[in-house]
Amino acid sequence: MATYAIGDIQGCFRSFERLLTRIAFDPEADRLWVVGDLVNRGPQSLEVLRWMREHDEAVVAVLGNHDLHLLARHAGVIQASRSDTLAPVLEAPDVDALIEWLAARPIAHADGDLLMIHAGLLPTWSRETAIALASEIEAELRGPYRTDFLHALYHERPKRFRPNQHLRNRRLAAAAVFTRLRAVDAEGQMVPRFKGPPDSVCDGQVPWFLHPERKSADTTIVFGHWATLGLWIDDRVVALDSGCVWGGSLTAFRLEDRAVFSVPVTR
Ligand SMILES: [Mn+2]
Protein backbone atom coordinates (compact mmCIF):
# COMPACT_ATOMS: atom_id res chain seq x y z
CA MET A 1 0.00 0.00 0.00
CA ALA A 2 1.20 3.49 -0.88
CA THR A 3 -0.16 7.02 -0.58
CA TYR A 4 0.30 9.40 -3.48
CA ALA A 5 -0.26 13.16 -3.33
CA ILE A 6 -1.08 14.59 -6.72
CA GLY A 7 -1.13 18.12 -8.09
CA ASP A 8 -3.84 20.27 -9.65
CA ILE A 9 -5.81 18.19 -12.20
CA GLN A 10 -8.21 20.92 -13.42
CA GLY A 11 -10.22 18.64 -15.63
CA CYS A 12 -7.20 17.02 -17.31
CA PHE A 13 -8.71 13.57 -17.00
CA ARG A 14 -6.60 11.87 -19.66
CA SER A 15 -3.39 13.03 -18.00
CA PHE A 16 -4.80 11.87 -14.66
CA GLU A 17 -5.56 8.41 -16.07
CA ARG A 18 -2.09 8.22 -17.53
CA LEU A 19 -0.56 9.15 -14.17
CA LEU A 20 -2.61 6.46 -12.42
CA THR A 21 -1.28 3.92 -14.90
CA ARG A 22 2.26 5.20 -14.41
CA ILE A 23 2.08 4.65 -10.62
CA ALA A 24 0.07 1.43 -11.06
CA PHE A 25 -2.53 2.88 -8.70
CA ASP A 26 -4.61 0.22 -6.95
CA PRO A 27 -7.76 1.75 -5.43
CA GLU A 28 -8.20 -1.34 -3.25
CA ALA A 29 -4.86 -0.84 -1.54
CA ASP A 30 -3.38 2.59 -2.35
CA ARG A 31 -4.54 6.03 -1.30
CA LEU A 32 -4.69 9.26 -3.27
CA TRP A 33 -4.27 12.73 -1.79
CA VAL A 34 -5.42 15.46 -4.17
CA VAL A 35 -4.37 19.07 -3.55
CA GLY A 36 -7.58 20.58 -4.96
CA ASP A 37 -8.65 22.29 -8.18
CA LEU A 38 -10.06 19.06 -9.53
CA VAL A 39 -12.05 21.04 -12.06
CA ASN A 40 -12.15 23.92 -14.55
CA ARG A 41 -10.07 25.32 -17.41
CA GLY A 42 -9.32 21.77 -18.58
CA PRO A 43 -11.62 19.67 -20.83
CA GLN A 44 -12.98 16.87 -18.62
CA SER A 45 -13.97 18.13 -15.19
CA LEU A 46 -17.05 15.92 -15.19
CA GLU A 47 -15.00 12.76 -15.69
CA VAL A 48 -12.59 13.78 -12.92
CA LEU A 49 -15.41 14.40 -10.44
CA ARG A 50 -17.15 11.13 -11.29
CA TRP A 51 -13.90 9.19 -10.86
CA MET A 52 -13.20 10.81 -7.50
CA ARG A 53 -16.68 10.18 -6.18
CA GLU A 54 -16.63 6.60 -7.40
CA HIS A 55 -13.31 6.02 -5.61
CA ASP A 56 -14.30 8.01 -2.55
CA GLU A 57 -12.81 5.51 -0.11
CA ALA A 58 -9.37 5.78 -1.69
CA VAL A 59 -9.38 9.58 -2.07
CA VAL A 60 -8.65 12.54 0.19
CA ALA A 61 -9.19 15.73 -1.81
CA VAL A 62 -9.02 19.25 -0.34
CA LEU A 63 -10.94 22.13 -1.89
CA GLY A 64 -9.27 24.65 -4.19
CA ASN A 65 -10.42 27.97 -5.58
CA HIS A 66 -11.76 26.40 -8.78
CA ASP A 67 -13.72 23.84 -6.74
CA LEU A 68 -15.29 26.67 -4.71
CA HIS A 69 -15.97 28.45 -8.00
CA LEU A 70 -17.92 25.40 -9.20
CA LEU A 71 -19.90 25.29 -5.94
CA ALA A 72 -20.70 28.99 -6.37
CA ARG A 73 -21.73 28.53 -10.01
CA HIS A 74 -24.02 25.66 -9.03
CA ALA A 75 -25.50 27.71 -6.18
CA GLY A 76 -26.23 30.47 -8.70
CA VAL A 77 -24.34 33.18 -6.82
CA ILE A 78 -21.86 33.97 -9.62
CA GLN A 79 -21.87 34.03 -13.42
CA ALA A 80 -19.57 32.01 -15.67
CA SER A 81 -16.07 33.34 -16.19
CA ARG A 82 -14.83 33.46 -19.79
CA SER A 83 -12.34 30.65 -19.18
CA ASP A 84 -14.82 28.34 -17.40
CA THR A 85 -15.22 24.84 -18.80
CA LEU A 86 -17.81 23.76 -16.24
CA ALA A 87 -20.92 23.46 -18.43
CA PRO A 88 -20.73 19.64 -18.80
CA VAL A 89 -20.70 19.32 -15.00
CA LEU A 90 -23.54 21.78 -14.44
CA GLU A 91 -25.66 20.10 -17.12
CA ALA A 92 -24.94 16.50 -16.07
CA PRO A 93 -27.82 14.36 -14.77
CA ASP A 94 -25.79 13.56 -11.66
CA VAL A 95 -24.71 17.15 -10.99
CA ASP A 96 -26.43 17.39 -7.60
CA ALA A 97 -24.74 14.26 -6.28
CA LEU A 98 -21.36 15.45 -7.57
CA ILE A 99 -21.82 18.87 -5.97
CA GLU A 100 -22.80 17.35 -2.62
CA TRP A 101 -19.73 15.14 -2.75
CA LEU A 102 -17.51 18.12 -3.58
CA ALA A 103 -18.99 20.36 -0.88
CA ALA A 104 -18.20 17.71 1.72
CA ARG A 105 -14.45 17.74 0.94
CA PRO A 106 -12.13 19.20 3.59
CA ILE A 107 -10.29 22.51 3.36
CA ALA A 108 -7.30 21.02 5.19
CA HIS A 109 -6.25 17.43 5.79
CA ALA A 110 -3.84 16.59 8.62
CA ASP A 111 -2.19 13.22 9.04
CA GLY A 112 0.74 12.73 11.40
CA ASP A 113 3.46 15.15 10.43
CA LEU A 114 1.70 16.23 7.22
CA LEU A 115 -0.84 18.90 6.40
CA MET A 116 -2.44 19.22 2.95
CA ILE A 117 -4.14 22.41 1.77
CA HIS A 118 -4.76 23.87 -1.69
CA ALA A 119 -2.80 27.13 -1.62
CA GLY A 120 -1.22 28.33 1.63
CA LEU A 121 -1.24 29.39 5.27
CA LEU A 122 -0.61 32.79 6.81
CA PRO A 123 2.63 33.07 8.84
CA THR A 124 0.68 33.59 12.09
CA TRP A 125 -1.19 30.31 11.71
CA SER A 126 0.13 27.31 13.55
CA ARG A 127 -0.84 23.85 12.39
CA GLU A 128 -3.55 23.78 15.10
CA THR A 129 -4.88 27.22 14.10
CA ALA A 130 -5.06 26.13 10.47
CA ILE A 131 -6.95 22.95 11.32
CA ALA A 132 -9.43 24.86 13.51
CA LEU A 133 -10.04 27.52 10.84
CA ALA A 134 -10.44 24.87 8.16
CA SER A 135 -13.08 23.04 10.17
CA GLU A 136 -15.06 26.27 10.60
CA ILE A 137 -15.13 26.74 6.81
CA GLU A 138 -15.99 23.07 6.24
CA ALA A 139 -18.98 23.46 8.59
CA GLU A 140 -20.19 26.45 6.55
CA LEU A 141 -19.92 24.52 3.28
CA ARG A 142 -21.68 21.45 4.69
CA GLY A 143 -24.38 23.37 6.56
CA PRO A 144 -27.71 24.95 5.62
CA TYR A 145 -26.19 28.36 4.83
CA ARG A 146 -23.70 27.25 2.15
CA THR A 147 -25.26 29.51 -0.49
CA ASP A 148 -25.03 32.56 1.80
CA PHE A 149 -21.41 31.76 2.59
CA LEU A 150 -20.50 31.35 -1.09
CA HIS A 151 -22.34 34.55 -1.99
CA ALA A 152 -20.37 36.45 0.65
CA LEU A 153 -17.12 34.81 -0.45
CA TYR A 154 -17.49 36.17 -3.98
CA HIS A 155 -19.28 39.45 -3.33
CA GLU A 156 -17.82 40.70 -0.03
CA ARG A 157 -14.44 38.96 0.11
CA PRO A 158 -12.64 40.76 2.96
CA LYS A 159 -8.97 41.20 2.19
CA ARG A 160 -7.31 40.93 5.57
CA PHE A 161 -7.40 38.20 8.15
CA ARG A 162 -7.69 39.22 11.79
CA PRO A 163 -8.20 36.57 14.46
CA ASN A 164 -10.67 38.66 16.46
CA GLN A 165 -12.90 39.86 13.65
CA HIS A 166 -16.54 38.82 13.29
CA LEU A 167 -16.77 35.03 12.87
CA ARG A 168 -18.19 35.10 9.36
CA ASN A 169 -15.57 37.59 8.15
CA ARG A 170 -12.80 35.53 9.68
CA ARG A 171 -14.01 32.45 7.85
CA LEU A 172 -14.30 34.31 4.55
CA ALA A 173 -10.79 35.71 4.86
CA ALA A 174 -9.41 32.32 5.87
CA ALA A 175 -11.15 30.59 2.95
CA ALA A 176 -9.45 33.01 0.56
CA VAL A 177 -6.07 32.29 2.16
CA PHE A 178 -6.45 28.50 2.11
CA THR A 179 -7.48 28.48 -1.55
CA ARG A 180 -5.68 31.45 -3.16
CA LEU A 181 -2.57 32.47 -1.20
CA ARG A 182 0.79 32.72 -2.94
CA ALA A 183 2.74 35.61 -1.41
CA VAL A 184 2.47 37.56 1.84
CA ASP A 185 3.37 41.20 2.47
CA ALA A 186 5.52 42.75 5.21
CA GLU A 187 2.59 42.54 7.61
CA GLY A 188 2.10 38.84 6.90
CA GLN A 189 -1.13 39.37 4.95
CA MET A 190 -2.10 37.87 1.59
CA VAL A 191 -0.96 39.78 -1.50
CA PRO A 192 -4.18 39.72 -3.56
CA ARG A 193 -4.16 38.81 -7.25
CA PHE A 194 -0.45 37.96 -7.32
CA LYS A 195 0.14 35.11 -9.78
CA GLY A 196 3.75 35.43 -10.88
CA PRO A 197 6.73 33.22 -10.21
CA PRO A 198 8.18 33.33 -6.68
CA ASP A 199 11.10 35.55 -7.67
CA SER A 200 8.76 38.23 -9.01
CA VAL A 201 7.34 39.31 -5.64
CA CYS A 202 7.70 42.99 -4.76
CA ASP A 203 10.10 44.27 -2.09
CA GLY A 204 8.91 43.31 1.37
CA GLN A 205 6.84 40.42 0.03
CA VAL A 206 7.75 36.75 0.21
CA PRO A 207 6.27 33.42 -0.93
CA TRP A 208 4.14 32.37 2.04
CA PHE A 209 6.12 29.19 2.77
CA LEU A 210 9.43 31.10 2.95
CA HIS A 211 8.26 33.58 5.60
CA PRO A 212 10.96 33.49 8.32
CA GLU A 213 8.47 33.42 11.21
CA ARG A 214 5.94 30.97 9.81
CA LYS A 215 4.36 29.19 12.75
CA SER A 216 3.53 26.09 10.71
CA ALA A 217 7.21 25.47 9.90
CA ASP A 218 7.25 22.35 12.09
CA THR A 219 4.81 20.61 9.73
CA THR A 220 5.35 19.28 6.21
CA ILE A 221 2.88 21.13 4.01
CA VAL A 222 1.54 19.55 0.82
CA PHE A 223 -0.13 22.01 -1.56
CA GLY A 224 -0.64 23.05 -5.18
CA HIS A 225 -2.26 26.13 -6.79
CA TRP A 226 0.94 27.87 -7.85
CA ALA A 227 1.76 26.75 -11.40
CA THR A 228 4.43 29.43 -11.86
CA LEU A 229 6.16 28.05 -8.76
CA GLY A 230 5.98 24.54 -10.18
CA LEU A 231 7.39 21.58 -8.33
CA TRP A 232 9.09 22.64 -5.12
CA ILE A 233 10.05 19.83 -2.80
CA ASP A 234 12.19 20.22 0.29
CA ASP A 235 12.14 18.85 3.85
CA ARG A 236 9.00 20.70 4.89
CA VAL A 237 7.37 21.85 1.66
CA VAL A 238 5.82 19.74 -1.11
CA ALA A 239 4.39 21.96 -3.87
CA LEU A 240 2.84 19.88 -6.65
CA ASP A 241 1.20 22.15 -9.25
CA SER A 242 3.33 21.38 -12.29
CA GLY A 243 0.88 23.20 -14.57
CA CYS A 244 -0.86 20.35 -16.37
CA VAL A 245 -3.71 22.55 -17.60
CA TRP A 246 -1.17 25.06 -18.96
CA GLY A 247 0.59 22.42 -21.06
CA GLY A 248 2.98 21.27 -18.33
CA SER A 249 2.75 17.99 -16.47
CA LEU A 250 0.79 16.22 -13.76
CA THR A 251 2.79 15.05 -10.77
CA ALA A 252 2.41 12.44 -8.05
CA PHE A 253 4.52 12.40 -4.87
CA ARG A 254 4.68 9.15 -2.91
CA LEU A 255 4.53 10.06 0.75
CA GLU A 256 6.30 6.96 2.06
CA ASP A 257 9.58 7.41 0.17
CA ARG A 258 9.21 10.86 -1.44
CA ALA A 259 9.45 9.41 -4.95
CA VAL A 260 8.20 11.77 -7.69
CA PHE A 261 6.29 10.68 -10.81
CA SER A 262 5.30 13.06 -13.61
CA VAL A 263 3.47 12.62 -16.88
CA PRO A 264 3.33 15.30 -19.59
CA VAL A 265 -0.12 16.67 -20.39
CA THR A 266 -2.20 14.34 -22.55
CA ARG A 267 -4.87 16.08 -24.60
MN1 LIG B 1 -5.89 27.02 -7.46
Image: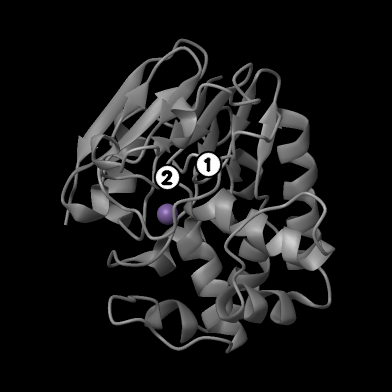
Question: Mark 1 near ligand 1 (CB under 8 Å)?
Answer: no
Q: Quadrant of ligand 1?
A: bottom left
**Displayed quadrant of residue 44:** bottom left
Q: 106 above or below 4?
A: below
Nearer-the-camera pick, 17 or 225: 225
Residue type at mark 2: give it: Arg
Q: Residue 188 sits in which quadrant?
A: top right
* Residue at horizontal 29 percent and vertical 82 percent from the top: 82
Q: Amino acid at mark 1?
A: Gly
Kindly identify which residue carries mark 1: 120
Report the residue marked by disc 2.
Answer: 182
Residue under the point 45% across and 55% down: 37
Q: Is residue 258 above or below residue 109?
A: above
- Relative placement, left or right, of 244 versus 218 is left
Closer to us: 107 or 229 = 229
Q: Mark 2 or mark 1, which is nearer the start of the sequence? A: 1
Between 164 and 175, the one lying in front of the other is 164
Quarter of the image with the C terminus in it: bottom left
Give how far across and how far down residue 148 sits, in percent. Answer: 73, 81
